[in-house]
Every structure is written in structure tokens, then in C-alpha cells.
Image (cartoon, rainbow, N blue to C red):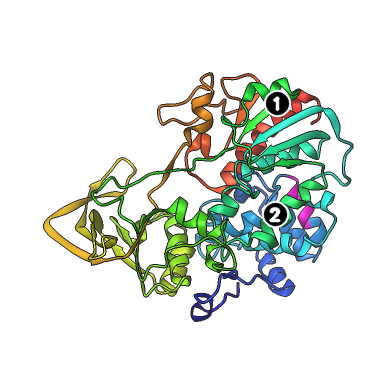
Amino acid sequence: MPHQPPEQRITNFDEVALGYSMDMAVTEAARCLQCKKPQCVKGCPVEVNIPDFIAALVQRDVEKAYKVIKGTNSLPAVCGRVCPQESQCEGSCILGVKAEPVAIGRLERFVADEFFHRDACDLISDKPECPLIDEEKKVACIGSGPSSLTVAGYMASRGCKVTVFEALHELGGVLVYGIPEFRLPKSKIVGKEVNALNDLQVEFKTNAVAGKTFSLQELFDQGYKSVFIGVGAGLPKFLNIPGENLSGVFSANEYLTRINLGRAYSFPDFDTPIVRGKKVTVYGGGNVAMDAARTAVRLGAESVHIVYRRTQDAMPARKEEVDHAVEEGVIMECLASPLEFKPGEDGNLGSVRLQRMELGEPDDSGRRRPVTIEGDIYELPTDLAVIAVGTRSNPVLLESEPDLKLNKWGYIEVDEETGETSMPNVFAGGDIVTGAATVILAMGAGRTAAKEMAKRLGCE
């Protein structure tokens, strides 16, 4: 797929990947072997009928291809951009054994983008027409991230009256506050998918904080028959080292939210200031760390280091994201672990002390455990540190609902077959159940819950 060249893209927040042309998409789709027992479908958390949509694309029938995808996936333009296809559908493609697998994610993105100018009812639903909404079949979705949007689309397309409650002022959850514009355009993609739900008469209420402005019981008292909790896992983890409270040390949550949701990359056009560090260090090796580092590059940093205690090939981030970061000048400070943030002469963050590491024996995950090299400590100048080492469940809703059973990690326990929690007719899915995971897994959980909710309300 064509991309902006690195020297160009580091100067803007436009999307890096430029997309296929029709001819390119058809050529790629024609590589599909149309297996009788397609493993790619098994590798997809929402079970998209991949061979059928690709076969339609080979015939240049974009409308049919989209109908196949949308039968199980409410957010194909999003998934085509941010899902880890290499470890899911593409990772199961038989062509990948000896050559490159079919670029299923890129084809999904192409089909969705091509189809986006069509009717909204056809866009978001797997029904040919907008249904009549039954005001008595009221469903509440808490949070407006991928799992809740999946539930909302599924239920509304079957005639249920859906209301989505969002704590922030803008809709989309992690899709808008967590993923940068250059990976997932907000107005062009996320906004389009969200706005399509309006035509299905989904009602959105922003600035509505579950556990503070309303309780689950209040929703049932207002006539809601079923509630889905999709609030994500937005409480950041920290390193717990000295100096972490210095000015200039951010959690990735705050850093990315300010820039993505608050449009800080366009200050002062948008009144959300952000620290533009000259020597930036990012801690972690996942997609969030890559997003933070590549954002810092675009904000004009002189140097950006990703500090990671294992090697680059062990990073959990998508390989494509790591490769893009390296192309854009991000330095991988691998086999290093932070010991202490130190202030500069002005009292703000000035440097970080790092412990060199080496790989020892494998741990429980099968990866070789990093161990310290005694006495090998060095200092790296930094005036901006972004900590991207994971998140925990946000306690705001959970602490106000003692009847919700939690697991030992503080996430909501659900029935794996239905998504129902310990509270009758209260369902949950996404990161608030699994911990931080992928968009497509959150959508799969939303689809599981929506099927059971629709069954109970008689609107399958």
C-alpha cells in the first residue's frame, strides 16, 4: 500500500497509509486461494466471511463486499486500519506459510472507504433498510468505544431504542482519544461511523459519567431493559520510580488525550497546550508507546527514544508500527530499564538514569526474562517522558456498583458465552473485562453481548 514518505509525514498529522486504488485492491484480492476450509475466518474475532468479501471484490462489486463484511463487523474502516491482522486473519492465511498472506486488513479498509458515501442505514447495519424503532425496547450502552458502538449498531439495526452514554465531550472512546490522527482519522473515519448510528436513531449523551451522574439502577428505573458496560480500562499504570512526579513526566493517557482529543497538535487554534519536548523518552514497547513516540516526532522533538527492557523484536507493538517509528527517526533504546527521573537546573525533568539489561532464561510467557547487568548504569538527557506501560480498570463506575463481581485484577467478570455480568441484564465487554487489548477483540465481545441482548428482547 502506498504511504507518505517518512520525511514528509513527520511534518503533518495526515494518515500515513494512503490506501489502495481499485486496480491495486483487485490485484491483491485475486491472490486469495478461496480455501474450502478458510482458516482466516477462524482467526477473525468477529468472524467476517473473508473469502466471500474478497471474491466480490475480485468482481469489483464493492457493495456486495461491504454487505458481507458488515454482516458481522460494524466498524470495518476502523478495523482495517488498527487491528493486528498479522496475528489474526492474515496470520492464519495459508499463503503466509511460504509467501506473503493476502492483505486482508488493507482490503477491508479499501472496501469500507469506497462504500462510505452510501446510505447510512445500509452503512452501519446488516439490514437493507432502516428499521422501525420500538421505544419500549430500550437499551443503554455506557461508553462510546468500539465495543459499545458494536452493541449500538447491532441493537438499533434490529429495532431497539439505543442510548449511548459517554463521559467525555466527544464520541468514539479510545478511537478518538487514544489513537493518533495519522493512524486513524477522526472526522473522516470515526466520525463517519458514529454519525451513521444517528440515522438509526441511536441517541448519544456526552458528559455523562457512569457512577457519578447516574447509576445502573437509575437506568433500569428509566425503563431501560438491558445495559452494556464498555467503559474501557483508562487508568494509567506508572513506573513507581523516584522523580515520577516531576514536571515533564506524563502518562501516555494524558499525553495522547491532550493531543488527539484536545487537538493540542494545532495549538493555539485549539486551546489545549502541550509540552513540546526537545529530548523525549517513551517507556514501553506496545502500540501506545509507538503512537506517543511518533506523535512527539511530529511535534518537533529533536530526538525521541523508546526505552524498552527487552529487544526490539520482542516488542508487543505491531511490526508495521515499529517499522514506521524507526523510519521516522525514533531511536530504540532497548535492553534498558528506568531507575530514576532527575530534575534539571530549572527543577523540571532533566534526565533519566537507566539500568542496562540482558536477556536471561524464559519467563512464564515464553519470552526471555530481562535481567540487570550489575553496575552498568547510564544517564540519558530528557525533558519530556511519556509512560506507556499499560492501564488498569477505571474505578469510577466499579466502586459505585458493589454488586458487579470483579476478578482478582479488578476487571468485570462476565459469562464468556453471553457477556452477562453478575447483575441480571447488565452486560460488559472490551478492556473493562479483558484488560487492555485490541479494537477487534472489544468489538467481538460487544457482538457476543448484543446477540444475547437481542435474543432476550425478541429482536434477533
- Disc 2 designates what residue? 51
User: Which amino acid, by three-letter code, is at mark 1?
Assistant: Ser
Query: In this orientation, which residue lies closer to the viewer: 5 or 293?
Result: 293
Marker disc for residue 226? 1
Looking at the image, tell me whether mark 1 or mark 2 is earlier in sequence order.
2
69 up-or-down from 384: above or below = above
Residue 148 quadrant = top right
* Of residues 298 and 400, the one drawn nearer to the viewer in this rendering: 400
Closer mark to the observer between disc 1 and disc 2? 1
**Is disc 1 placed on a helix, strand or loop?**
strand
Residue 270 lies left or right of residue 395; in this view the side is right
Residue 324 is labelled as none
Category of crowding for the residue at label 2, using alpha-carbon neighbours closer than 10 angstroms: few (below 14), some (14–19), many (at least 20)? many
Residue type for callout 2: Pro
Quarter of the rendering containing residue 414 = top right
What quarter of the picture does the N terminus occupy? bottom right
Q: How far across and how far down the image is residue 228, in percent? A: 64, 32
Q: Secondary structure at mark 2?
A: helix
Q: Residue at x 77, y 46 (%)?
A: 197
Residue 177 lies left or right of residue 389; in this view the side is right
Q: Is residue 288 above or below residue 426?
A: below
**Residue 284 at what x, y percent from top left?**
36, 54
* Residue 118 spot, x, y in % from top left: 83, 59
User: Is residue 389 shown to the viewer in this render?
Assistant: yes
